[in-house]
Image (tube, helix red, strand yellow):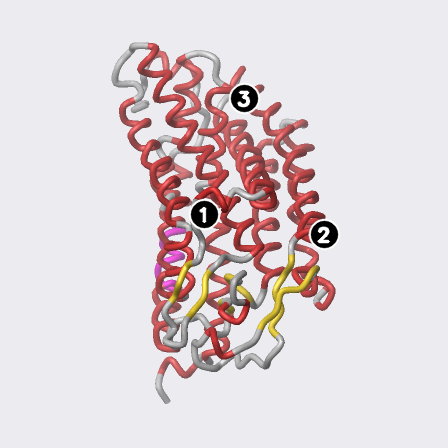
Amino acid sequence: MILHDLISYEALRLIWWLLLGVLLIGFAIMDGFDLGAATLLPFVAKNDVERRVVINTIGPVWEGNQVWLILGGGAIFAAWPPLYAVSFSGFYLAMFTILFALILRPVGFKYRSKLEDPRWRKTWDWALFIGGAVPSLIFGVAVGNVLQGVPFHFNTDLRIFYDGTTLFELLNPFALLCGLVSVSMLVMHGAAWLSIKSEGPVADRAHAAGEVAALLTAALFILGGIYLWLGVDGYRVTSELNPAGPSNPLGKTAVMEPGVWFHNYATYPATMLAPLLGILGAVGGYVLLNKRRDITAILATSASIAGIIATVGLAMFPFILPSTVDPNSSLTVWDASSSHLTLFIMLVVTVIFIPIIIAYTAWVFRVMWGKVEEKDIREDRGHAY
């Protein structure tokens, strides 16, 4: 028996769908507090020392957290090539905007405190804000467009054609609402991080901002669900799908119908735990931040993030990228994956390296645990930013 036959093709496709969700959640949790804290920078820090406090809470760890973004992009490229091709081509301008904003982060961290000129530092403070707020918004906008479907199709030779036009068509009302959910969610998470890592006025403002963001997250998430139910068509496969069949998106028929994205929740009631976790985690984050239970607050905000992202994946299953111009071209878990052998090799590599990544990340956070204090910033005791 060939080694990769130990796990069926159907099982490997499902495993990689789950792993993709785990990687996206890992990125949103680990890099999310960096993005959220950077978004809060101009609002929770009122002078140069306070801003340096905020920057030094995320400066030593943000690069390590970026590994989850790289893993997610790599997983999409290797496990779901058509998904990578459509999303990174169709969302090219959006991705370029995100990349530009993310590039501002390392430059801002390295150069912000090189000069003592207040105008120089203020400029980089706003650059760091852009590096946090813009990706937070556009990631959410992208999810909103995925839920609505993307204008692409395959021809008979399985060549992919993207039929969209400009970046601005992605900025539709539902997608912008999803973008606001993303921003409030990550600001909530970033505020929880700042409440752990800072003290004094910065921590007080972070608590206040986090409480507002937590309530907004719950409210906007619920509003997004109502909008999805009333105003966004979902997708349904009308032909038979072979979970172990060849990767051919045109081998099925699919249709757009109102309310379809809620069918999985009706069919499998246990999946309702995901949206409930998203809402209750945000409400719990509000309560715990209000009571200054900072460690449990960040656990609650992390749970909210996991629930919100899982809600999208569970609602869409088995779709991973629907097509608005030709529903039959929509990509699903069962017809858009790499080969059996590729998925197996990737799984082996993942089983080896993900625990290593988790272990060194845990070690880094353990070594760098503790609050960033203003007196250390003033005396510049080992702080690089």
Do the residues under discs 1 and 3 have CB atoms within 8 angstroms? no
- The image quadrant that residue 101 belongs to is top left
203 to the left or right of 34? right
Q: Which residues are magenta?
A: 350-360
**Residue shown at 43% from the left, 27% from the top:** 129
Quadrant where the image shows the N terminus: bottom left
For image coordinates 41% across by 54% down, the residue present is 90
- 1 or 3: mark nearer the eye: 1
Distance between the Cα atoms at labels 2 and 1?
30 Å
Quarter of the figure with the C terminus: top left
Residue of label 1: 27
- Residue 83, numbered label: none
Circle 2 packing at 10 Å, graded few (<14), some (14-19), many (20+), is few
Q: Marks 1 and 2: in contact by CB < 8 Å?
A: no
Q: Is residue 332 left or right of residue 346?
A: right
Q: Real-space Cα distance between discs 3 and 2?
A: 40 Å
Amino acid type of the residue that numbered disc 2 sits on in the rendered structure: Leu
Label 3 sits on residue? 203
Mark 1 or 3 closer to N-term?
A: 1
Is residue 120 placed above or below 365 in the rendered structure?
Answer: above
Between 327 and 135, the one lying in front of the other is 327
Looking at the rendered structure, the secondary structure element under dot 1 is helix
Quick check: 58 above or below 124? below
Q: Nearer the viewer, mark 3 or mark 2?
A: 2
Q: Main secondary structure of the magenta part?
A: helix
Choose between 349 and 155: the one closer to the eye: 155
Q: Earlier in the sequence, mark 3 or mark 2?
A: 3
The percent position of residue 285, horizontal first and vertical second, equals 64, 36
Q: Which mark is residue 230?
A: 2
Compare residues 266 and 46 and report the one nearer the observer.
266
Q: Position of residue 383 (x, y in %)?
A: 32, 23
